[in-house]
Amino acid sequence: MPILMCPPTHFGVVYEINPWMHVASPVDPRRAADQWEALRASYRDLGVEVVVADPVPGLPDMVFTANAGVTWGGRMVLSRFRHAERQGEEVHWRGLFAARGMPVLDTEGIPFEGAGDALFVGDTLVCGHGFRTDRSAIPLVARALGVDVVELELVDSRYYHLDTCFCPLDAGTILFAPSAFSPDSRERVRRLARRVIEVPDHIAAGFACNAMPVGDVVVSSEAVAGLSGQLREAGYRALGLPMGEFMKAGGGVRCLSLPVPATWGRPAPT
Ligand code: ARG
């Protein structure tokens, strides 16, 4: 599947909408560009097509394409951002997906933050709520995509999006940080897959769960090194990349990456 990325041309920490963001510790634009390019290069080396969205001045978090929306079966449900600071992105994401001929659905104004809070385990949609996505948006998203859904409650504001603490590697393998979930939801995750790798807080806080599986490689931040033994046992190899500049905004590899339908890739050479 191709991955949508948006270059960090206008990226920065200019407001604070999650506990990682401090306007007093600014982003180094050069280093951010290097980290973003290294992620793009890793995808290319792994044979993944990267589709690049146009960055827009004044929308510094647009680099986090995971929050554009969620796609499934050729449809997309657009995000409705909780914070006014990001709502200006919506019109651009809608335009991009509509231009690709995808039906764009929405949650009728109810906060929902796309693939940041909506990940698939096999054919089942798993949605996080508690900080960004409103619980009442979840049935609307599931209905729009025509899928079964499992809801998980997030309780630690450092893990304000599901993708910061939960990552399906395949239909039978999940990475997750138990401390980010309510006790009920923690148990629910443990029943979701055959192999559930529990990530301790000190590793999860380095954005290790904010990962993208590509075949048998788990692309993530450098903190993923702490999981390499368990990943190896599960048949995966960890690829850790420096993500420090994006972590200042509360994001890592997965936040910078949105899987899009195969038809978005370049046509195969004839
Ligand atoms: N600064 C962004 C925000 O708070 C970071 C988004 C990270 N994205 C993600 N999918 N977890 O909205």
Image (cartoon, grey):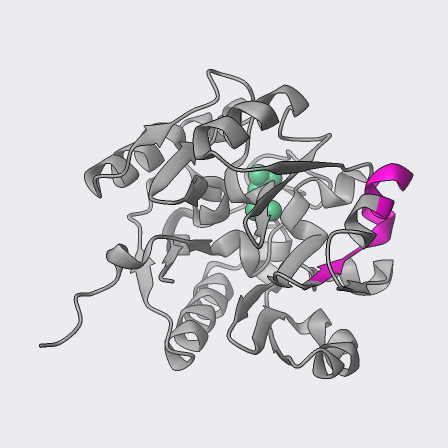
Give the vertical position of 128 relative to 26 (above or below).
above
Q: Magenta segment, which residues? A: 174-187
Q: Quadrant of ligand 1?
A: top right
Give the vertical position of 83 relative to 146 (above or below).
above
Q: Which residue is drawn at 81% across and 63% down?
A: 199
Give the vertical position of 94 relative to 168 (above or below).
above
Q: Where is residue 127 in the image (x, y as percent from the top left)?
A: 64, 38
Q: Position of residue 211 (x, y in %)?
A: 60, 63
Give the vertical position of 110 relative to 179 (above or below).
above
The quarter of the picture where the C terminus appears is bottom left
Is residue 180 inside the magenta stretch? yes
Q: Is residue 182 visible?
A: no
Q: Is residue 136 left or right of residue 198?
A: left
Q: Residue at x 21, y 39 (%)?
A: 101
Q: In which quarter of the image is residue 194?
A: bottom right
Observer-nearest of 21 and 200? 200
Observer-nearest of 211 and 85? 211
